[in-house]
Image (cartoon, rainbow, N blue to C red):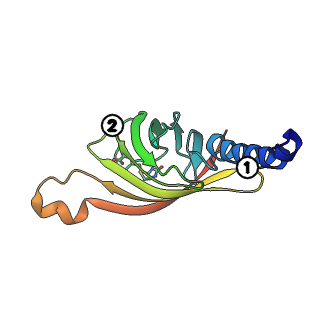
């Protein structure tokens, strides 16, 4: 085959490569970065690994107790798709409770990202009889700061 007859095929392959490269390098709505929610709480999520695993830290603005609030660790997974669903846990370092968040990341046309979440906050019950009152449920919306 003459060389100039292969140009359309080569262009096709090149376009396919570029489209694939864009979707790999520019996944829409990664969770990494700094976030603030509607209560004024702040969290930072470090880089997300290829399999969606991530870690981070959470500084809550509110608490169910009078202990001094300190930064607490986050571990979680996001899906590896665009506008991914995700889940993460916070092990509060100033109380005996744990919160799990689930949600989805949404990216607007301007590039701003929001996390719509639902959470369960499990406190330590004093005894089995008090188990029924140890779990709270709520929702938070986080906006990206970076
Ligand atoms: C505790 O009170 O035992 C630990 C702090 C819990 C803070 C909760 S988690 C859900 C909600 N969203 C926040 O940003 N803070 C509160």
Q: Within the image, what quadrant is residue 25 found in?
A: top right
Q: Is residue 121 left or right of residue 22?
A: left
Nearer-N-terminus badge (2/1): 2
Q: Residue 111 carries which label?
A: 1
Q: In which quarter of the image is the N terminus?
A: top right
Element on which disc 2 rests: loop
> Mark 2 and 1 residues: CB-CB less than 8 Å, in contact?
no
Residue identified by numbered label 2: 94
Closer to the observer: label 2 or label 1? Answer: 1
Residue that protrudes farthest toward the bottom in the picture: 132
Give 19 or 50, whichever is nearer the viewer. 19
Q: In this view, does 108 lie above or below 93?
A: below
Q: In this view, does 122 lie above or below 96?
A: below
Residue at image position (34%, 46%) is 65
Residue at image position (73%, 49%) is 111
Ligand 1 within 8 Å, label 2 CB:
yes
Residue at image position (36%, 50%) is 99
Element on which disc 1 rests: loop
Residue that protrudes farthest toward the front in the picture: 1
Assess disc 1: are there few (<14), some (14-19) or many (≥20) residues with their C-alpha within 10 Å of its C-alpha. few
Give 136 or 89, whichever is nearer the viewer. 89
Residue 133, how many percent across, how many down? 24, 64
Q: In this view, does 92 lie to the left or right of 133?
A: right
Residue at image position (42%, 54%) is 101
Q: Within the image, what quadrant is residue 21 found in?
A: top right
Residue 39, how many percent across, how many down? 54, 52
How many numbered badges does the structure rendering display? Answer: 2
């Amino acid at each position: 085959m003459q060389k100039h007859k292969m140009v359309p095929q080569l262009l096709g392959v090149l376009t396919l490569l570029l489209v694939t490269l864009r979707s790999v390098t520019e996944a829409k709505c990664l969770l990494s970065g700094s976030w603030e929610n509607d209560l004024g709480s702040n969290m930072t999520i470090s880089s997300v690994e290829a399999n969606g695993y991530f870690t981070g830290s959470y500084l809550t603005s509110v608490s169910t107790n009078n202990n001094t609030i300190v930064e607490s660790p986050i571990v979680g997974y996001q899906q590896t798709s665009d506008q991914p669903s995700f889940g993460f846990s916070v092990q509060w370092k100033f109380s005996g409770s744990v919160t799990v968040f689930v949600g989805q990341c949404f990216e607007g046309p301007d590039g701003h990202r929001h996390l719509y979440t639902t959470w369960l906050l499990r406190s330590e019950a004093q005894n089995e009889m008090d188990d029924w009152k140890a779990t709270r449920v709520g929702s938070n919306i986080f906006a990206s700061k970076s």
